[in-house]
Amino acid sequence: MGRKRERSLAELYADDPERADSVVFGRRPGVSRRGFLGGAGYAAMSAAVGGPIVYGATMPGGLVPAALAQDAAKAPAAPKGPQYLKFPGKDPGLVVLGERPLVAETPEHLLDEETTPIAKFYIRNNGQIPEPVKDADAWKLTVDGEVNGKLELTLGELKKRFKPRTYRMVLECGGNGRSFFTPQASGNQWTNGGAGCAEWTGIPLSDVLKAAGLKSTAVYTAHYGTDLHLSGDATKPPLSRGVPIKKAMDQHSMLVWAMNGEPLPNIHGGPLRLVIPGWPGSASHKWLSRIWIRDKEHDGPGMTGTSYRVAIKPMVPGAKADSSNFKILESMPIRSIITNPSNGTKLAAGTREVKLRGAAWDGDSEVRRVDLSVDYGATWQSATLAKPKNRYDWRRWTASLKLPSDGYYEIWARATDSQGRMQPHIAGNWNPSGYGGNPMHRIAVLVG
Ligand SMILES: Nc1nc2c(c(=O)[nH]1)N[C@H]1C(S)=C(S)[C@@H](COP(=O)(O)O)O[C@H]1N2
Ligand SMILES: [Mo]
C-alpha cells in the first residue's frame, strides 16, 4: 500500500464515507452485512488514521473513524478549514459558523473549565447586534398583555425591587449537534459547541410576572428585544419566541443582568436578557425590552413552520416536511462532551493510561450517568460525576482509561438521563432544521 493510496483513503472518507467504508470493510455482492476490520482493510485504515488500530476487532463497519470524521474544521461549509473568530474579548479559538448574522461555536476542548468564561462562551445572533448602551440601569422593560397591570420598569428598579440570585446554568442553542445529521439539515452547522455554562445573576422571571399579576387567560410568553432584523426593517423582529406560563414561572427562568459576576456583555444580550435553562437557547431572549403575555401559544418568528420544532412521527431523512407532523422543541436532549484531551491528541509512545475530563447536561431531566468506551462500545466504564451547583448546572466528570498498547484509539462518551434515555450512536429523528442531534461524542487519540 503506497503513500498515494494512504492519502486517498483519508480523502475518500472526507468525500464519500460510504465508498470508503466499502473499500475498507469490503462487501460481498448481495450481502449487506459488513464484517469487522481485518486484512487489507485493517492496513489501509491504520495507515489512514496514523497508527495500528488497537481495538480493530470491535470497530464496526460503517463507522467513519473519529480521526477522519467531519468536525467544524472540516465541515463542507468550510472547505479551507475553520474560520476563527476575531471579536473583542473573545477567545480566538472560537469557530465562526456564520458572519451575517454572527454565529460562533466553542470547540469541545475549550469547554474544559467548570464555569465557561465569557471569552469562551458561544455566540448566536439572528439579526444585527445592537450598539452597547451607556446607562445600563436606565434600560426599560415592559410587561403587558394578559396581566392585571402593565409594568414598565427600569433595570435599576428591577435590581432594587426584587431579590437577586445567582445560578450556574447551561445555555444551549436548539440547533446544537446539527452537523451530525445526514443528510445535512439546514442552518448553522454546530458540532457540540453551541453550549456553555455560566453563572447568571438576576431575578426569577416569576417575581416580575407575579408583580404584574397574571390573568387566568395567560397562556404563553412572547419575547421582544432591540436587535434589528438583518434586512434593517425595524417593523420585523429577527426572532420572537416564548414559553408556556408554567416554564416561565419556574424559579430558574430568569431575567439576567450579570454573567460570571460581570455586567452582562452586549454580545450576550446586555444590559438585560432572559435565561430559560434546559430549553432551546432561542427562548433566552437578549436585549430584552418587552414581555407580552399572550392568551395563546406565541406565533412570532421562530415559533412556526419547522423552526425550533421536531417531527412527531419519525420522517424519512431528507424528505419534505408535513407541517402537521411537528411539535415545539421544549426540553433539550441529554449530551456529554470530552473536554480533555482534545480530538486528535497524540500521546507519547508507551503511555498506558489516559485521564479524561468532560461535561454532561440535559434539559429538564437530569444526568444520571456518563460512560466511556475505548473499544467502539464493546465495554463501558463509568465516569465520576461532580455534584451540580444547582438545577440546570452541568455535571463535570472525570475518568481514567487504560490503553493496552501503542496505536490508534477512539474514546466515546455517552450520557444517560434520569429517565434512562441515552445518547445514540448517530443523530436520530431527522428533521429539516436539525434539532435534537445528540450522538455520543468521540475523540481520536494516537499513542506513539
Ligand atoms: N434578541 C435576541 N435574542 C436572542 C437571539 C437573537 O438573535 N436575538 N438568539 C437566540 C439564540 S438562537 C440563542 S442560541 C441564544 C444565544 O445566546 P448567546 O449569544 O449569548 O450565546 O440567544 C437567543 N436570544
Ligand atoms: Mo439558538
Image (cartoon, rainbow, N blue to C red):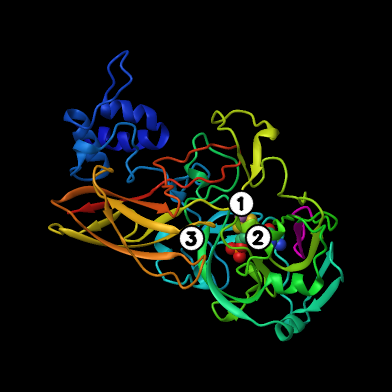
Q: Dividing the image into four quarters, tell me where ligand 2 lies.
A: bottom right
Sequence-first disc among 1 and 3:
3
Amino acid residing under circle 3? Thr
Q: Position of residue 123 (x, y in %)?
A: 58, 62
Of the 4 image quadrants, the one containing the N terminus is: top left
| Label 3 environment density (alpha carbons within 10 Å; few <14, some 14–19, many ≥20) | many
Find residue 310 and report its image quarter.
top right
Left or right? Give the position of 442 relative to 81. Answer: left
Label 1, label 2: how far apart the Cα atoms are:
10 Å
In this view, the residue farthest toward the top is: 30
Pointer 2: what residue? 247
In this view, the residue farthest toward the front is: 216
Contact check, label 1 and label 2, Cβ < 8 Å: yes
Asked if the stretch drawn in magenta spans residue 146, the answer is: no
Q: Which residues are magenta?
A: 220-231
Task: Judge whether 325 appears above or below 242 on screen.
Answer: above
Pointer 1: what residue? 330
Task: Judge whether 354 appears above or below 430 on screen.
Answer: below
Sequence-first disc among 1 and 2:
2
Amino acid residing under circle 1? Glu
Q: Which mark is residue 109?
A: none
Left or right? Give the position of 197 relative to 319. Answer: left
